[in-house]
Image (cartoon, rainbow, N blue to C red):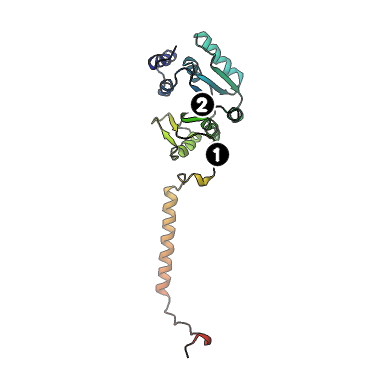
Amino acid sequence: MPGSLASRLASVDRLLADPPAAYRFIAERCPPGTRTIETGSGLSTVLFAALETDHICCTPGPEERERVLEYCKAHELPTEGLRFELGSSHESLPRIQAAGTEVDLALIDGSHGFPLPVVDWFYSGAMLRTGGVVLVDDVNLPAVRTLLDFVDRDPRWRRLSDSPKWAAFERTGRGPLAEDWTAQPFYVHRPAGVRGLAQRVRGRIRRELAGRARRSPTCPSPPLSGRNRTP
């Protein structure tokens, strides 16, 4: 039973000779019974089984599910806590959220084509309890960087890791993530190049107006109209 931290870390070492730091991060935070969810499947799914979490795996088809179950059986790992949701995550995650599911940790490692990492975060993050953690893999990919550009700015998410491969965030709130832009004053994207261009344009306009004023002759004041003239 992987109840203690030492035994959970030992489970990671048994799975891989050189386990990724992300897997050790997961093991540190997932005692038996932890409610977890992931998009994608593979060794991470096997890890959740070994840790005896209450795990939901969103994976495209039955082939991935069978491979995981066969691996677990060959290595005598428990699978009672595994639940597979087959299909694209943009279809399965809304159903899972609508059922009122709440999780302690979410792993986003499914499709990395835009906008699916954002979609996975939108639904998985909404299922996190207060203080729950989302872990995002492959942060070097463009669609994932787009997601992190937002989450890193949002003060309601606290970054827990600093890795070139993956990132983890703790959510300080709970509930759905849908909101209007007015609730996101932190998300103002003004690239330095655009700011510099605007400053140069304003400066040029001021210089041109000043030059025209210097070249123009002084104009006499227009006469007052008869009805406003002092008698």
Q: Which SS class for mark 1?
A: loop
Q: Which residue is mark 1?
A: 178
The residue lying at 45 percent from left, 51 percent from top is 194
Q: Residues within 10 Å of mark 2 (few under 14, many from 20)?
A: many
Residue in the image at 52% along x and 19% along y:
54
State if disc 1 and disc 2 touch (CB < 8 Å): no
Please tell me which residue lies in front, 183 or 200: 183
Above/below status of 208 relative to 15: below
Foreground residue, 216 or 125?
125
User: In the image, residue 130 lies at what x, y percent?
Assistant: 47, 31
Residue 2: mark: none
Residue occupying the point 53% across, 33% down: 126
The numbered dot on residue 103 is 2
The answer to whether 133 is drawn above or below residue 77 in the figure is below
Q: Nearer the viewer, residue 155 or 120?
A: 155
**Residue 69 locus on image (x, y percent):** 55, 13
Give the position of the N terminus as an image quadrant.
Answer: top left
Classify mark 2: helix, strand or loop. Answer: strand
Name which of mark 2 and mark 1 comes first in the sequence: 2
